[in-house]
Amino acid sequence: MTFFETALLYTAVVLMVQWMYQIWDQTTRHLAPGPMEFPIIGNLWQAWKADPKYHHKALYKLSKVYGNVMTLKLGMVNEVAINGYDAIKSVLNNDEFLNRMDADWLLHKSFGKKIGLVSGSADYWKPTRRFTMFHLREFGFGKRYFQQSFLDTEIDEISKIFDQAIAQNDGRIQPNKLFGIPTVNVVWASVANSRFDYDDVRITKLVHLMSEWSSNAKLFEGIPSAFPVLLKWFPQIFSTENLQKIDFEMQGFLRSLINEIRDQGTFQMEPKSFIESFLQNMESDSSKKREFQHVLTEENLISILYDLFLGGSQTTSATMSFALLWLAMYPEIQERIRNELTAVIGNDRRATLEDKSRLPYTRAFILELHRTSCIVPLMPRKVFKDTKFEKFVIPANTLVMLNPYSILMDEEFWGDPENFRPSRFLDQNNNIINSDRVMTFGGGRRNCVGETIAEGTIFAFVTHLVQKYQFLPAQLGQKFDTSSIVGISSSPHLYTIQVAKRDVY
Ligand code: HEM
């Protein structure tokens, strides 16, 4: 036997033994089914073959073979992928799955601890979220009157940018970065009850840090996420070092913003914002302070603010960039929204959040926008003890990867998921249907805290921009790239459109 034949035989025997063990293990421990594992790489090969670029697409494809609850071993990481509406909904509503993934590079933004909102461990997260939501709402967070007042100012500012493009550049504009400042301002208004002017260096810095964080945090890219030790050993190669620098800078920056507010001293008398309320409770000796004592720390406040900025800025701004892309690409859809706005609102005033229920086609456009943008294609949760789900057991320390893409792009349900077609969300009587399938903001107790703010912002921007401007391709026969750049969230590739002003208020 040649050396080559011996090696081949040896490999075949190792694989046979490994696969027999896997079948035995899966059966005796009631694990969910999954592809056969290879030594060391586990199922990386099958995931790569299913889709070399996008993990969410690979999981969706593999789920068609192995089912909606599927066990994978990706290098060193044990993962259970959850696909499809019923399975995802049932995980989201199950408190056994409240914990998030706890990768070192992610925890760095919260001082290496499981604190804050996004990375808070379930027991620390509960009081943090309760305290945060109570005090954000105290100052109007998520309430219509509050949103409308600060959205109006941001709309004025963004309109100036479009007017300037029309006056100076024949209306040509690249919308990708346009919504960075207004969306960060919306978050800042929610926590500090004030806004930054567009020429304030502090807002430019915040927007820059958020976008740098998102482009360095390549969460589910094959090799480094499968072998997390590589991130530790080669921090320069895998962006971990960059990410840590951004975290240090952002933490220092947030600390200085908090100190500016602390130095004003008004928080001790009558807090006027979430940050002031947090500081007041942190420094007082009330009974409430005692209830929340362990979460009222400056590190936790910085982590909460960091999470609100990270959660709220890139996501909303990327959704708006996708909105202008679809509007320019489909003039007939744009005209239908505009006709609805003219019929219901007229041309003398802006739409407000009160008008929303009377604008079904506009709402259907926004639902279709969320569906096709798939801004957060994967939601990682983690179980720390053996957990029963359906007829399977998910072993302790498994990453539970929820895949909303599998709902948003489900061919069986939508028929033509690749097409942008808002009318799929309307029945014959113009009533909204199937909106529950657009799980853009997650669900259950750990859903997105900014859902109402994001929805209010997107509605206000879309209605105002379609009322006041016309969005066109920048050149005749322009081909738009509607695919996404996927990091921790999705965004469109750089594109150019042309904007023209309409004759309204
Ligand atoms: C279009 C815009 C947005 C999208 C698509 C989005 C999507 C999501 C998703 C999918 C989750 C995970 C939910 C889950 O695990 O069930 C999440 C969590 C979160 N989002 Fe958003 N979000 C958006 C806007 C915002 C805004 C405006 C804010 C802040 C004002 C925000 C702050 C957060 C925070 C802090 C979390 C973590 C919540 C927790 O763990 O308790 N998001 N978001």
Image (cartoon, rainbow, N blue to C red):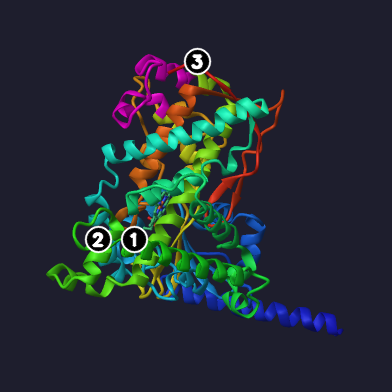
* Amino acid on which the number 3 mark rests in the picture: Asp
* Amino acid on which the number 2 mark rests in the picture: Phe
The image quadrant where one finds the C terminus is top left
Distance (Cα) linking label 3 and label 1: 43 Å
What residue lies at 24% left-to-right and 60% top-to-bottom?
A: 267
The image quadrant where one finds the N terminus is bottom right
Label annotation for residue 267: 2
Asked if residue 353 lies in the magenta stretch, the reply is yes
Label annotation for residue 488: none
What residue lies at 29% left-to-right and 47% top-to-bottom?
A: 141
Task: Give the magenta-colored segment's residue range.
Answer: 336-362
* Residue 496, x across and y down, in percent: 66, 34
* Amino acid on which the number 1 mark rests in the picture: Ile
Asked if residue 165 lies in the magenta stretch, the reply is no
Q: Which residue is mark 1?
A: 261
Q: Which residue is mark 3?
A: 503
Residue 130 can be seen in this image:
no
Distance (Cα) linking label 2 and label 1: 8 Å
Residue contact between numbered discs 2 and 1, judged by CB atoms under 8 Å: yes
Number of the front mark, 2 or 3: 2
* Residue 29, x across and y down, in percent: 41, 75
Label 1, secondary structure: give it.
helix
